[in-house]
Amino acid sequence: DQQVKQNSPSLSVQEGRISILNCDYTNSMFDYFLWYKKYPAEGPTFLISISSIKDKNEDGRFTVFLNKSAKHLSLHIVPSQPGDSAVYFCAAMSGSNYKLTFGKGTLLTVNP
Amino acid sequence: ETGVTQSPTHLIKTRGQQVTLRCSSQSGHNTVSWYQQALGQGPQFIFQYYREEENGRGNFPPRFSGLQFPNYSSELNVNALELDDSALYLCASSLGGASGSRETQYFGPGTRLLVL
């Protein structure tokens, strides 16, 4: 039973446009959410996080939005760059439990 | 500052064998978590070690075991290897505590294990 779902296996975007990656979760105990980026042959790299007490967090070109009532979060990348091409994982935590629960990932391709 | 390192990078074993994977945590980090990433899946939590004690465990059988050393480096041991154990094994370190905190987990490059 997948508690964190990324329903789009892949997304293709033109350079300079906005990339929107989506994530849904089912466990209402999750209260902290993270996005990681993964290049081939490398480990996941932390991008941005958001606590359930917020609905938006911004860091440069990356913004994460959280809709708790819909149990949905999204990552916006503006403007998208070819170097952003990677697999993006959504992950969630609950309470003081350090366990990260990951989605299956979305492969983002940014075309020049 | 040194990041998280893992060894070996690749490994081939046969069914029934045992394997030990190693992880050196980022400088200053006292917590290590291990994840298994099967092909086409997201990483799945195996267990976490904080100050040499297991601090949480995912849905993995007892043949998956671990250790953390006084310098906070860690080992993942898998006994009686099965074909389904073929995966990328990721180690992540953080500065945490048993009481809970939201410190970010930083991942190493992983060890790719193939079981034949």
Image (cartoon, grey):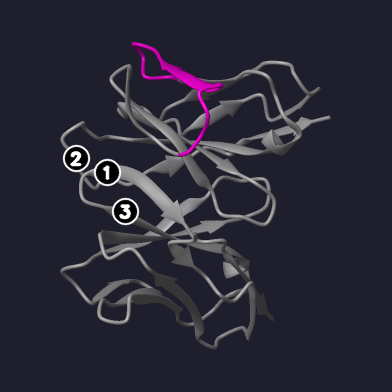
Please check the rendered image and state whether residue B12 is part of the magenta-colored stretch, yes or no. no
For the record, the magenta segment spans: B59-73
Q: Position of residue B96 (x, y in %)?
A: 25, 35
Q: Which residue is mark 2?
A: B100
The image quadrant that residue B7 belongs to is top right
Q: Is residue B34 left or right of residue A30?
A: right
Amino acid type shown at disc 3: Met
- Judging from the image, mark 1 belongs to the subunit labelled A
Residue type, mark 2 in image: Gly
Label 2 resides on the chain identified as: B
Rounded to the nearest angstrom, the CA distance separating label 3 from label 2 is 11 Å
Give the residue at x 48% y 52%: A45
Along the line of sight, which residue is nearer the eye, A51 or B2? A51
Q: Looking at the rendering, in which quadrant would you find the C terminus of chain B?
A: top right
B57 with respect to A12 (left or right) = left
Return the x and y of residue B52 as percentages of the image width and height.
Answer: 32, 16
Does the magenta-highlighted stretch encompass residue B70?
yes
Q: Are marks 1 and 2 in contact (CB under 8 Å)?
A: yes
